[in-house]
Image: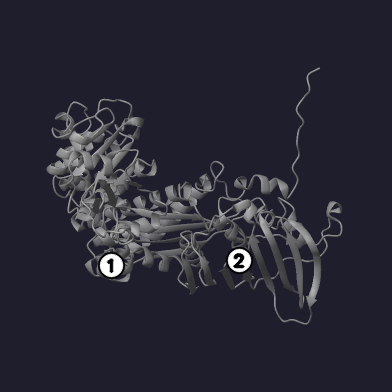
Amino acid sequence: MTQQAQISVLKFPESVRKRKEMYLTDKNHAVFEIVDNAIDEFSAGYCTAIAVAIVDDQVIVEDNGRGIPVTPHTDPEYKGLSQAEVAYTVLHAGGKFGQKDGYQTATGGLHGVGAACVNAVSDNMQLYIYTGGNKYEIDFEKGHIVENLKVVEEGLDKTGTTVHFVLDDEIWGDEHFDLKKIRKRVRQLAYLNPGLLIYLYLDTEDKDGKRVKVEETHQYEEGLKSYVEKLLKGKNPVSDIASCMTELEDMEVHLAFAYTDGYSQDIYTFCNNIATEAGGDHLTGFRMGVARAVEKYALENGFIKESSEIESDDTREGIIGVVSIKVKEPKFEGQGKSKIKMNNVRTVVRNVTEEFFLDYLNQDTERAKAIINKVLVAAKARKAAKKARDTARSKQAILDTSGLPGKLADCQSKKPEECEIFIVEGDSAAGSAKQARDRRTQAILPVFGKILNVEKSRIDTVLKSEKIQDVLKALRCGISDTFDIKKLRYHKIIIMSDADVDGAHIQCLNMTLFYRYLRPIIEAGHLYMAVPPLYKVAKGKNVTYCYSDSELEAMDTEGAFVQRYKGLGEMNPGQLWETTMNPETRKLVQITIEDLETAEEYFSLCMGNDIESRRNFIVENAEYFTAS
């Protein structure tokens, strides 16, 4: 007789502790599950201030809302437990399911699992509730109640909820909070909820083991308008900030945006305070509304004769904006909450945007003229870019594999997953690299000098650059609307430049090209920076390479010959292979985008036209640059 496998049933909190990844992505997520409950109290009109503190490993979140209900739960299954105890020990229990006494406003929580999940993965948690003139306390350990609800003080003129918890090392190991992300999210929540005061206090170690102490308060009465002001840092606006807030029967639509003299469009979207990084119907609605308003104004005022003269993308060149909606029962696409899928949201946001923006344009002729002229120049550049691409195709230049750059030393393998290309600064270094390389899997493309700064250039100018054409020919994946990552020739693209100021500038220029026009390559993890050594230290036959001043200082260099490499060209092929190209011994830095908003700010600051902001940024970060 064949023995059948037993079906196991995991109950709370073991179900969460064993598979925490199903509920919480990281330690930051745990903090913001509790913070989001306080935000919901603000959205419902009962809370005005929230405090968040992380001191060593202790997390404290406090709000001045109504306090979690402490009355007995009415379900016989939970007899003897208060509503607060059920909310923190039962999955899918909460005040967000539309019941009579639950939240009647839009909330970020959909499933009622956040507080209970955080409790389950905490070593200990204390819940303090201020309501009805009393202070109540409940104590938990690893998700279990160890002290039931009890009154600890009476006669208090205070309401709200305070949660203390320490996440369990058994579950989280040596993972640290990402304090930069926590600071950003707190600031973001304050922007998204006008008038809410959020106090943040940090006194703990970051993920790199460095002690961080921060105390800051965020409150923005103008909400998204203040958010866009922050996003405009390092950019040159050509219009003031347009902002509106519309409350409909079952939806709130908040918009704020401005046009800059740049060429990219950066629109950040949110639903119920959740960042929808993949966009969705609210982003589509906003884009359609902007296009329709611009087209209507341009036609009515004689800027164009036919709507076909401009396209939707033209109307958004240089736009920086934020779209935030709050809606009951939001519907997200897929398992995550990164994309909204709701047709009614698209329609409402489109109509709100079109009506508001058209009125905005009609209010000020000079302001409207500046925006429409920018749109017309964008349309002209688009047509020029199309012509440049068509010409390139006819010459078998950018997309045709027979039009490879003459200086490219390609590799023998045709499998992209095992191929890598070094984009090398200068012919001298490229000569050594060609001799040093593994010809089967490593290709070399010399690019002499600095490529075009694409931050200050439209796509038509980018496509005319011979150096950029060489890069595009080698990669064979196209650019802009012709881009296809499936055609990418190499799955490791390695920028290799000298370890000096000029080399760093070349790295920035190349990264800007990939960020602006080939971003999916970065997102897929295919872009890298080579890290050549700064010093060669020779003691007799023993040779050591140092990659920073601190590494050299830590060495015993007495009696040694120390050589400072001024450039890649100073290394012979053997040294270049050993230090910078050999997959077994080299150092590579993978270029990633953890935070689009911050990346956008840094590219604009470092590569844009705002010299004063760039100077201030360098001064403020002088210690970092010196340390690097």
- The number of discs equals 2
Is 250 placed left or right of 601 in the picture?
right
**Residue under circle 2?**
59
The N terminus lies in quadrant: top right
Looking at the picture, tell me which residue is in the foreground, 426 or 594: 426
Residue 146 in sight here: yes
- Looking at the figure, which quarter contains the C terminus? bottom left
Q: Is residue 576 above or below residue 1?
A: below
Closer-to-camera residue (618/78): 618
Instruction: Identify the disc placed on residue 618.
Output: 1
Report helix, strand or loop for mark 2.
strand
Left or right: residue 523 compared with residue 573 = right
Depth check, front residue: 118 or 305: 118
Q: Residue furthest top?
A: 1
Q: Is residue 443 above or below residue 555?
A: above
Give the residue type that dot 1 points to: Ile
Measuring from the top left, give residue 429's x and y in whole percent: 16, 43
- Residue 456 lies in quadrant: bottom left
The local secondary structure at tag 1 comes to helix
- Which residue lies at the image location 21% right of the left edge and 28% below the top edge? 400
Where residue 82 appears, as percent x and y from the top left, is 80, 62
